[in-house]
Image: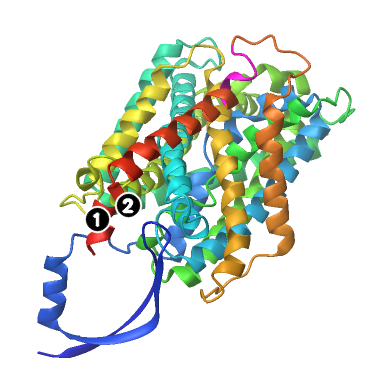
Amino acid sequence: MQEVDIPLTVHRVIAGGRRSSISSATFSATGSDLLDVETAEPAELERTLGLWSGMAIVIGTIIGSGIFSTPSLILTAVGSVGMSMVVWVLGAAVSVCACVAYMELGTMLPRSGGEKEYLQAAFPRPRALLPFVFCLSSLAVGSPSGLAADSAVTGTYFMYAATGRSVEHSEWAQRAIGVAVALFCTFMHGFFVRAAIRLQSVLTVVKVLLLVLIVTVGFGVGIKRGTRGFGDAFAGTSTHPSAYVSALFKVFFAYSGYTALNYSIDELRNPVRNLPRAALGGLLITATLYVLSNAAYFVVLDEAAVRDASTAVAGVFFTEAFGALWGQRVVPLLIGLATLGNVMCGMFSASRVLFEAAREGYLPWGRVLGSISRFQSPLVALAVSCTLTIVYIVTPPAGEAYAFLIDIGGYPLWLFYGLAVVGLLIMRRSHRDLVRPFRAWHVANGVTIATAVFMCVVPFVKPESDDGEIPYWAAPLAAVAFILLSCVLWYVQVVVRRGPERSHYAHK
């Protein structure tokens, strides 16, 4: 039997914060040895993602309902067209800083799970507390709320295409379509893994082409008849900090997704090389298209039209530019497919976090939730992610559900972004021996931490007007309450039941 030399580079963080690493080791094995390893060890997910498919996942995860639906909400929050554009540019700059920090984290600890791995390495005491709380917050609040928001907007645009109206749809019909979208994405990722990745790539191309079309139309209209929304660009600008938190939550929701590969890095080929290129490249492409697309909206539509469009601003834009047939039927259908692609990418990432949390022993029934089906997918984890998404689709009250879902998901997201980057700075001192193929800039780390503090404190400041059906404090308070509940569940699962000691990784 022929021997083969297998280069192996491993960075492994063991439950409880103990770390073991093997750097660039080489061992020999025969073909029968390799077969024994494959049959003796529990199944692992295959590395099916390369640079371009990885970048497609990043772009596909970022470009979702946000750019097609939040511009109206952001304009309403900050009060003026000019400040709305400033907020989009600021969101892009902050997102680049956070992405750079996560590039160091992902190449230093190249293992699926994202913040779970980083918090576990940086904060080993109390044992597994922060990674446990992150996993539960992400699984039960952050991921399903974002997926529910995207699914609901997919329903909005499919209804727009079916009826030709941007508003006055049956909200429950939109939610029913959202449920169908979540089920479809779960089915594809569960039973047709490679086909789902190819479909994600195709839908990503559709999204990019839609944004390019928006930019091109805006540029053409601007040359022909001038701008409509930039007359007195900063008139009416809000001066209250809570207005900018509301706007930034929605901007960051639109930009979120640049960390998608950090959660599924075990499936990325050559992650040390491909992660930084795919993540930063995908974000920069998307940020450029976002800023130009917002400018195009305000070139074609006046300020009042953008405000009145609510979550269907892209559909109103194309109706104004192309007329009823294309603007009310064809393009809304394409936008619905684009946001469906975002749900597919988000469901992919969310299921991987749940899968890793189960294998780490953070969840009950870890062997089941962390299992891999014969289709080479974490089928049970996908089913649970889908179920939680459906709960978020059907339970919020009507009217302000979309904005509420964004806000409740954004709070824990930025809390753990900040903690992960604080952990990065700690590990530069406590884990000096770890290989760092990429090192984040100091300013990027500082901006990310400062933004996280701002996003976690100011939501509790009363806004200038609070006349909505849902109180301003409801979303952040609900997120904080769940984080505190997660601490209690941590004590039960980790301290009492000793889940990590009986986990999949404890027996490897």
Asked if 330 appears above or below 465 in the picture, the reply is below
Q: Residue furthest front?
A: 496
Where residue 317 sits in the image (x, y, percent)? 64, 28
Q: x and y percent of residue 51 in the render?
A: 46, 65
Instruction: Name which residue lies at 56% across and 58% down.
Output: 102
Q: In this orientation, which residue lies closer to the viewer: 443 or 81?
A: 443
Rendered view: 425 above or below 354: below
Say which mark, if any, is on residue 504. 1
- Which residue is drawn at the image coordinates 73% and 22% (left, top)? 76
How many marks on residues? 2
**Crowding near the residue tagged with mark 1, few <14, some 14–19, many ≥20 C-alpha atoms within 10 Å:** some
User: Outermost residue toward the bottom?
Assistant: 2
Secondary structure of residue under mark 2: loop
Residue 12, x across and y down, in percent: 38, 67
Callout 1 secondary element: loop
Instruction: Name the N-terminal-most of marks 1 and 2.
Output: 2
Question: What whole-number distance in Å separates the C-alpha atoms at marks 1 and 2?
Answer: 6 Å
Query: Which amino acid, by three-letter code, is at mark 2?
Result: Glu
Picture residue at 81% right of the left edge, 33% below the top: 83
* Amino acid type for the residue under numbered disc 1: His
CB-based contact (under 8 Å), mark 1 and mark 2: yes
- Quarter of the picture containing the N terminus is bottom left
Magenta stretch: includes residue 473:
yes
Where residue 402 appears, x then y in whole percent? 54, 22
Labelled disc at residue 360: 2
Mark carried by residue 53 = none
Q: What segment carries the magenta color?
A: 470-475
- Residue 252 falls left or right of residue 170: right
> Magenta region, mostly helix, strand or loop?
loop
